[in-house]
Image: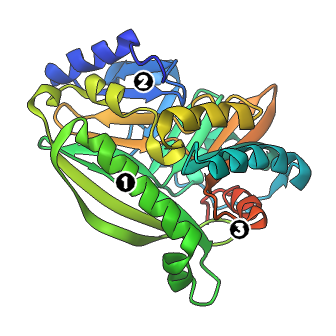
């Protein structure tokens, strides 16, 4: 598995024990762990808008007619990695593999405009390098109780009986059960009395293209004494996030690194805001990155042995959107 001994995890422990507010970002492979106290966020080019914290003033920007064009890779190109993933799923090396791609896009907005105009639970703009607008909480810690809300399974909200179809789709159900089981086990490493509070909740996501329904569950537990006020130690145990990796984690990571032909970087990593007492964190998805003056949208979904190729290719396309409306 990954080396999670980055020294900044110790720094996160020190700050949380001293009740000093801070923001952190960890990339997918847990190689980059960045920690910022509140007073050095702006000087490092970070704009943050979370549920209970922001360091930016909301601009009353005029709504724009968003023009987003995606230069999708061919189905043949997508299939190469997909077949690699399916090969391992059929062998039983993985039960769920999160397979993602990088798509070049053009949009008539800057990264900063996307940040200010987007409506999302979590938004971060990092210099002029990337912006994301994530709907997915990773973990919350409130009064030494830890919560996680895995989000797995989406459908076009315009479809007739969309919610019933999503809740009863055999593949989506299998994927959701697997992630809930994985994250329940993950939380058990840092918490006692772990339980599923809510199963297969349906959330509505409004986008500039089509509206989506997404399926989530809530799992909670009471932090073990040795993990209380130790945010770094908790992240060291839980990362990478199971919902954007798969199960079992170690073997599935090997499969992803072979099947995907690009570096995820901070995409599908985790970032969080510790306010001195409680933590709110998210999975860094719905992600646009600038590379050599071109923009790329990174998106994907969970693949199981029940997956249908055309549906998975379509899901990867569906997630290329900006929540501006």
Question: Residue tagged by mark 3?
Answer: 209
Snapshot quadrant of residue 238: top left
Label 1: state its secondary structure.
helix
Q: Is residue 285 above or below residue 275?
A: below
Residue shown at the point (13%, 40%) measured from the top left: 144
| Residue at mark 1 | 181
In this view of the protein, which residue sits in the foreground, 32 or 188?
188
Query: Quick check: 205 above or below 13?
Result: below
Question: Which mark is first along the chain, 3 or 2?
Answer: 2
Dot 2: element: loop
Residue at 20% over, 24% down: 16
Residue 273 or 149: which is nearer the viewer? 149
Within 10 Å of disc 3 (Cα), the crowding (few <14, some 14-19, many 20+) is some
Mark in the foreground, 3 or 1: 1
Q: Residue at x 62, y 90 (%)?
A: 160
Residue 127's x, y, as percent?
59, 26
Determine crowd level at label 1: few under 14, some 14-19, many 20+ residues with C-alpha closer than 10 A. some
Q: How many marks?
A: 3
The answer to whether residue 324 is left or right of residue 86 is left
Q: Is residue 258 above or below residue 323?
A: above
**Residue 85 at x, y = what percent?**
69, 46
| Residue 41, numbered label | 2
| Quarter occupied by residue 273 | top left
- Label 2, label 3: how far apart the Cα atoms are: 32 Å
Determine whether label 3 and label 1 are within 8 Å by CB: no
Foreground label between 2 and 3: 3
Residue 150, visible in the rendered structure:
no
């Amino acid at each position: 598995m990954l080396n999670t001994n980055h020294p900044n995890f110790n720094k996160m422990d020190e700050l949380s024990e001293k009740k000093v507010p801070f923001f952190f970002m960890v990339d997918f492979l847990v190689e980059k762990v960045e920690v910022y106290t509140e007073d050095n966020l702006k000087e490092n080019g970070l704009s943050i808008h979370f549920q209970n914290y922001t360091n930016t003033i909301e601009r009353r920007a005029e709504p724009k007619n968003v023009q987003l064009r995606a230069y999708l890779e061919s189905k043949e190109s997508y299939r190469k990695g997909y077949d690699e993933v399916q090969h391992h799923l059929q062998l039983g090396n993985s039960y769920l593999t999160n397979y993602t791609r990088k798509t070049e896009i053009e949009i008539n907005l800057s990264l900063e405009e996307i940040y200010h105009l987007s409506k999302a639970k979590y938004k971060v703009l990092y210099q002029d390098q990337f912006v994301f607008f994530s709907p997915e909480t990773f973990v919350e810690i409130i009064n030494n109780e830890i919560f996680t809300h895995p989000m797995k399974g989406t459908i076009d909200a315009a479809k007739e009986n969309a919610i019933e179809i999503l809740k009863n789709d055999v593949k989506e159900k299998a994927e959701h059960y697997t992630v809930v089981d994985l994250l329940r086990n993950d939380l058990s490493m840092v918490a006692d009395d772990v339980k599923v509070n809510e199963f297969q909740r349906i959330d509505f996501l409004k986008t500039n293209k089509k509206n989506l329904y997404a399926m989530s569950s809530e799992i909670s537990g009471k932090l073990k004494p040795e993990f209380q006020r130790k945010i770094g130690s908790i992240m060291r145990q839980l990362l990478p996030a199971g919902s954007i990796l798969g199960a079992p984690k170690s073997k599935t990571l090997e499969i992803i690194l072979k099947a995907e032909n690009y570096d995820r970087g901070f995409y599908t990593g985790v970032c969080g805001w510790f306010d001195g007492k409680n933590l709110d964190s998210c999975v860094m998805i719905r992600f646009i990155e600038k590379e050599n003056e071109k923009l790329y949208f990174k998106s994907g979904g969970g693949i199981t042995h029940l997956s249908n190729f055309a549906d998975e290719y379509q899901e990867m396309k569906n997630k290329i959107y900006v929540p501006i409306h």
